[in-house]
Image (cartoon, grey):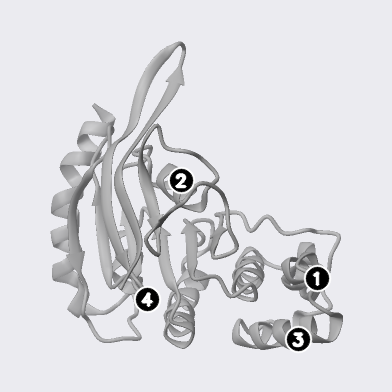
Amino acid sequence: MTKLEAKNIVKYFYHDSHKLEALGGINLKVEAGDFVCLIGPSGCGKSTFLRIIAGLEKPDEGQIMFDGHPITETGPERIMIFQEGALFPWLKVQDNVEFGLKMAGIPKNERAKISNRFLDMMQLTKFADSYTYQLSTGMKQRVAIARALVMDPDVLLMDEPFAALDAQTRDLLLVEMQLIWEKTKKTILFVTHNVTEATVLGNKIVIFSNRPSIIKKQFENNSPRPRVTEDESLLKLQQDILAELRPEVKKSRG
């Protein structure tokens, strides 16, 4: 079943009074339960595309369809996780995780029951009473993911959430993210610049061209899970992705 569909998404930006076409007609179908990784040259519009799906920006042309209906604004069924977790430093971890539930008017006891489940899933239970400024960058991202999951969205939109992490922390979270996906069956769109990350996480990898971006190619990834960064079975796919990416990266620098 198609959960999200991008129909000819075009987006322009203005720079020094010049009109620049960032997205040149993006067409993409995402099925329910897909884990889709979006990868392409820096500045090609991947994050802009994610923001359009979230309803945070509007396309100049085209439409995003969610369950067959056009998206015109933000909605609780689509939640975005940014590279920086955008947490509230004056709130404790559990209060950060429960923030959306509190805004939705969920009673305190029910909020605690829901949040405890996801604190446990993200291995945050013993940090529930800590302030987020006391946590490492990796732990903060766990909090951000838990805060998104408690709202039970249909779709998670993740904009390079592991980019600022050290390699060891990232590798741990790559495994945990796969386990969370398998437990929750969420539809996930995940922007990354890291080919290894894309092949470890995605069951589909979507290659964006240089600006004005279109989807150059899509790869299916049926390797068994959980996958790790050292998996030799992913090497051929990584090489194929790099072969598609290299000329686009070269154009972006030209």
- The reply to whether dot 3 and dot 4 touch (C-beta < 8 Å) is no
What percent of the width, then of the height, locates residue 6?
32, 51
Disc 3: CA contacts within 10 A as few (<14), some (14-19) or many (>=20): few
Counting residues from the start of the chain, the first of labels 3 and 4 encountered is 4
- Kindly identify which residue carries mark 3: 126
Counting residues from the start of the chain, the first of labels 1 and 4 encountered is 4
- Kindly identify which residue carries mark 2: 52
Q: How far is the residue under mark 1 from the one under mark 4?
A: 28 Å
Residue at 51% from the left image edge and 40% from the top image edge: 57
What percent of the width, then of the height, locates residue 17?
45, 11
Q: Amino acid at mark 1?
A: Gly
Query: Is residue 69 found left or right of 23 in the rendered image?
Result: right
- Kindly identify which residue carries mark 4: 33
Which label is found at residue 105? 1
Q: Amino acid at mark 3?
A: Lys
Q: Which one is in front, 132 or 52?
A: 52
